[in-house]
Image (tube, rainbow, N blue to C red):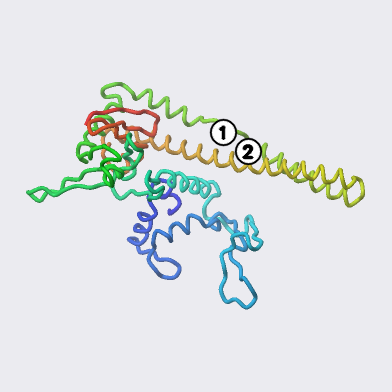
Amino acid sequence: MVFRNYLAGDSVRQIADSLNAEGYVTRKGHQFKPNSILNILANEKYTGNAILGKTFKPDVLSKHRVKNEGQAPSYYVENSHPAIISQELFDMVQAEKERRKNLRSTVKTGKGKYSRKYVLSGLLVCANCGAKFRRNGRTVASGEFIPTWVCITHQKDQQSCKMRPLKEKDIYAAYERAVKRLLGETDGLMDIIKQTTLEGMNIEQPEDIEEIRKALMQARKAVLDLFKAKRDGDVSLEEYERKYSEFSQQIVDLEEREKNVHAQNLQCQLAQKRLQDAYELIDEARSNCTDKDVMRKLLDAIKVISKHELEFQFNCGIDIKETV
């Protein structure tokens, strides 16, 4: 559930709160915290594999273990115990963590955090400076609270960004009009959405990772054969060193290609999942477009062009501008 909900868009705090509300506790009997969830999401043991040697004792007399950051050997053991999640799900969560890390950066500090506290959290982006928007507001004389959203840069220094705050109710009103257009009630975009979404389902992988892995196995076997040839005296020392250097560089290049293609494939799978979610939500959005979960899954971002104009960027690949 933790991995599935994270991939569905929940923040680590939301997942922790959900577990606590249902009465679950950690193995030490404590309540879950966001860091508890992050530790779960990073633990490869749920896939049935294990990394041995994550920590080590700096000396035989030490009573404490130290995190192994390359000071001592570590080993990756596959299928060491029964798995409870698939390797694919684990890898997709790691890619989603990286995606959120890129989303949450602010222009000023490069820091921030992924948030889903409010429906619009993390969705609004300033077209002037690229910063996210933060929920703010004021209480009028009647006691009513009027929520607004303000560019973080503008909030810190109005001279650095001139973008004015927007009322939350105006954003929602513009969003509802955009969804009506999206669903074809005014501009007939339904067929375009379906076509775009279905095309997204057939995204070709950038490169065949299995071919790279075969080439990697062959290169490693070539090194092993070279060792045997040297041991048996079938190659000269000069020839051995030349070929060993050549094979080593080939292995390094192939490992880098494998790493990059694997990351690209995971991003592709995440994109396909988001498109599929958006496609399945199209009919539901007709009658329930303002539902929090529906809105989060339909929208990729909302670009604030000005106080009076927004661009709604939907996950299905359609961008719609609306006046506020």
Tell me if mark 2 has few (under 14), some (14-19) or many (20+) residues whose alpha carbon lies within 10 angstroms of its own: some
- Does residue 59 appear left or right of residue 194 in this picture? right
Q: Residue at x 40, y 66 (%)?
A: 25
Judged from this view, the residue extending furthest toward the front is 159
Depth order, front residue of 137/8 = 137
State the image coordinates of residue 282 (x, y, percent, origin top left): 34, 32
Position of 122 relative to 49 (above/below): above
Depth order, front residue of 310/174 = 310
Residue contact between numbered discs 1 and 2, judged by CB atoms under 8 Å: yes
Judged from this view, the residue extending furthest toward the top is 187
Q: Residue at x 35, y 28 (%)?
A: 319
Q: Residue at x 63, y 42 (%)?
A: 256
State the image coordinates of residue 135 (x, y, percent, origin top left): 25, 47
- Does residue 179 appear left or right of residue 8 in this picture? left
Describe the element under mark 1 as helix, strand or loop. Answer: loop
User: Quadrant location of residue 49?
Assistant: bottom right
Between the residue at mark 1 and the residue at mark 2, the CA separation in whole angstroms equals 9 Å
Count of labels in the image: 2
- Residue 311, which numbered label? none
Q: Residue at x 54, y 50 (%)?
A: 86
Amino acid at dot 1: Gln
State the image coordinates of residue 76 (x, y, percent, origin top left): 63, 56
> What residue is shown with label 1?
205
Position of 115 relative to 182 (above/below): below
> What residue is shown with label 2?
209
Position of 107 relative to 275 (above/below): below
State the image coordinates of residue 190 (x, y, percent, origin top left): 34, 25
Depth order, front residue of 226/199 = 226
Position of 71 relative to 127 (above/below): below
